[in-house]
Image (cartoon, rainbow, N blue to C red):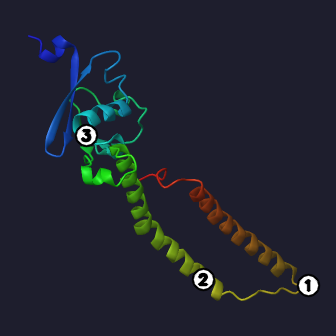
Amino acid sequence: MKSLEETQGTQKIIVTWGKEKIHLDFLRQGAGSLEETTLKQLKERLKKITGVPVNGQKLVFSGAIMKDDTATLSSLGIGPSSKVLLMGTKPDDKDLVQTTTGSPEEHALIERISQSIEKTRTNLIPQIESLETSASTFLSNQNDVVCPPEFETARKKRREAVQYTQGLIDRVDSVKDQLLHTSPTEVKN
């Protein structure tokens, strides 16, 4: 005897959101199947069911957060009977008042930006401060090295040291340029 899934031509996945278990049906083939449904489409579907904005959703499968919204569910390894974890909260009226548009999506973006800034404060700022301290200590311990013209080997070593130091400065400048041209929400969380 065939199961109801087999007779209707559907496949199920289970999405856990808090204490809720959401059973979602997908067609076996074509549009609406696991092979053709994208992560973005799944998020839109979950938004309709839970009220959690797409921008506020994190979906976890096999211990990994799925980030590529253009990937199909099957390409992410999701198959029939797969279990997916939804992390995110539905904003309440108090949250929506803080937005310009009253949109849950805007609220979710505000939350992501706030989380990005907090990660910067806790992770990046201490590293920058440590680099500043190290550079200051290094520079205060350096004496100008003057090489008389006849000390050609010493002058060559000094040039090598200057080139090496300039290479390090170039690396720091490169990171600085990357940060200047990346918005906080583009930084990987």
Compared to 18, does 126 lie above or below? below
- Tell me if label 1 and label 2 are in contact, CB under 8 Å: no
The circle drawn on residue 150 is: 1
**Circle 2 residue:** 136
Whole-percent x, y for residue 104 in the image? 33, 45
Residue type at the position of mark 3: Gly
The quadrant in which residue 40 appears is: top left
The circle drawn on residue 51 is: 3
The quadrant in which residue 39 appears is: top left
Distance Cα–Cα, label 1 vs label 2: 32 Å
The kind of secondary structure element at disc 3 is loop
Q: Foreground residue, 61 or 68? A: 68
- At a point 88% along the width and 87% down the height, the residue shown is 148
- Tell me if label 3 and label 1 are in contact, CB under 8 Å: no
Whole-percent x, y for residue 57 in the image? 32, 44
Looking at the rendered image, the disc whose residue lies closer to the viewer, 1 or 2, is: 2
